[in-house]
Image: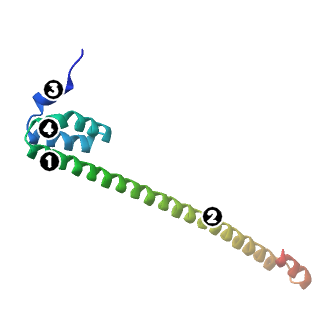
């Protein structure tokens, strides 16, 4: 079925309020491609009306584009924040892993000390120093 969308636009979206509602819906729910589509198909209708409607329509579209730009900036800033959080969590993970190594080293030293303390006291001090230095 072939349909002339321009006629549908003229019939169904003749009031400025309905036009504003549709544009806001397109901004909130749909992509900017749809907003451009609406602009192309509604612009001729606003030219048919008085200049006040055309100026209002242009103002509405400018506001929608400004809102879309602001939305994209917010999305980008949230993406940057997410990247920074990922880097911080990676650093914390690295520090935690380094801390694990330190804890393991300390526990190894403590176990060696307990072994040395459990040995009889007649072992020469040189052997004890060599055990500790290992």
Q: Earlier in the sequence, mark 2 or mark 1?
A: 1
Q: Nearer the viewer, residue 103 or 120?
A: 103
Query: Which residue is rendered at x = 19% and y = 37% of the image?
Result: 43
- Residue closest to the eye, 72 or 117: 72
Q: CA distance from mark 2 to mark 4?
A: 67 Å
How many residues crowd mark 1 within 10 Å: few (<14), some (14–19), many (20+)? Answer: few
Question: Do tag 3 and tag 2 residues touch (Cβ < 8 Å)?
Answer: no
- Circle on res. 47: 4
User: Is there a contact, CB below 8 Å, between mark 2 and mark 1?
Assistant: no
Residue highlighted by disc 2 = 97
Identify the residue position indicated by label 1 in the image.
Answer: 55
Residue 100 on image: x %, y %: 64, 66
Q: Which residue is mark 3?
A: 8
Above or below — where is 14 with respect to 92? Answer: above
Assess disc 4: are there few (<14), some (14-19) or many (≥20) residues with their C-alpha within 10 Å of its C-alpha: some
Tell me: 9 left or right of 104: left
């Amino acid at each position: 079925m072939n349909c002339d969308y321009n006629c549908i636009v003229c019939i169904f979206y003749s009031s400025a309020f309905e036009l504003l509602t549709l544009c806001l819906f397109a901004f909130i729910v749909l992509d900017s491609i749809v907003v451009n589509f609406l602009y192309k198909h509604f612009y001729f209708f606003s030219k048919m009306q008085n200049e006040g409607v055309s100026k209002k329509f242009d103002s509405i579209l400018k506001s929608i584009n400004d809102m879309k730009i602001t939305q994209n900036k917010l999305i980008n800033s949230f993406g940057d924040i997410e990247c920074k959080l990922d880097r911080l969590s990676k650093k914390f993970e690295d520090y935690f892993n380094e801390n694990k190594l330190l804890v393991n080293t300390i526990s190894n030293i403590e176990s060696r000390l307990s072994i040395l303390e459990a040995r009889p006291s007649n072992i020469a001090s040189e052997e004890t120093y060599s055990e500790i230095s290992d």
